[in-house]
Image (tube, rainbow, N blue to C red):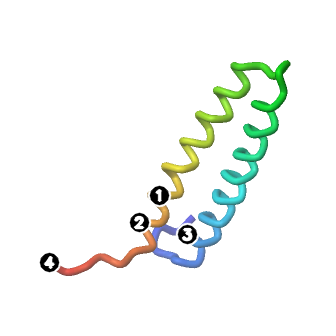
Amino acid sequence: MEADDPAAIARKLAELKVEHRDLDLAIERLTADVSADELSIKRLKKRKLWLKDCIARLESALIPDQPA
């Protein structure tokens, strides 16, 4: 992915947001299931946090630098 290409960054950002939303739904379903594996839920939550960090970095990359 080209670091200076706003279109590529926006596409990647959209992909990550979809994955983040999907993980949120999966975590919700698993926590409602009493027989769910706690380790799996923790791994999904960790992945979700990692995605959130990636999304924040990409969003900040889309903001143009302001001169001081």
Identify the residue under disc 2: 60
Residue linked to disc 3: 9
**Nearer the viewer's eye, disc 4 or disc 3?**
4
User: Please, what secondary structure does the residue beneath circle 2 have?
Assistant: helix
Residue shown at 52%/52% (left/top)?
A: 54
* Marking on residue 22: none
Q: Earlier in the sequence, mark 3 or mark 1?
A: 3
> Marks 4/3: CA distance?
25 Å
Q: Is residue 60 left or right of residue 39?
A: left
Q: Secondary structure at mark 3?
A: helix
Give the mark nearer the N terminus: 2 vs 3: 3
The local crowd at label 3, few if under 14, some if 14 to 19, many if 20 or more residues have their Cα within 10 Å, is some
Q: Which residue is mark 1?
A: 56
* Crowdedness near tag 1: few (<14), some (14–19) or many (≥20) residues, C-alpha within 10 Å: few
Alpha carbon distance from label 2 to label 3: 10 Å
* Residue 59, horizontal then vertical, whole percent: 47, 66
Identity of the amino acid at label 3?
Answer: Ile
Along the viewing direction, whichever of 58 and 38 lies nearer the viewer: 38
Q: What residue appears at the point 44 percent right and 58 percent down from the top-left corner?
A: 57
How far is the residue under mark 2 from the one under mark 4?
A: 17 Å
Give the amino acid at mark 2.
Answer: Ser
Provide residue 38's location: percent of width, then percent of height. Answer: 71, 20
Where, quadrant-wise, is the C terminus in this rendering? Answer: bottom left
Residue at the spot of label 4 = 68
Q: Is 6 rendered above or below residue 56?
A: below
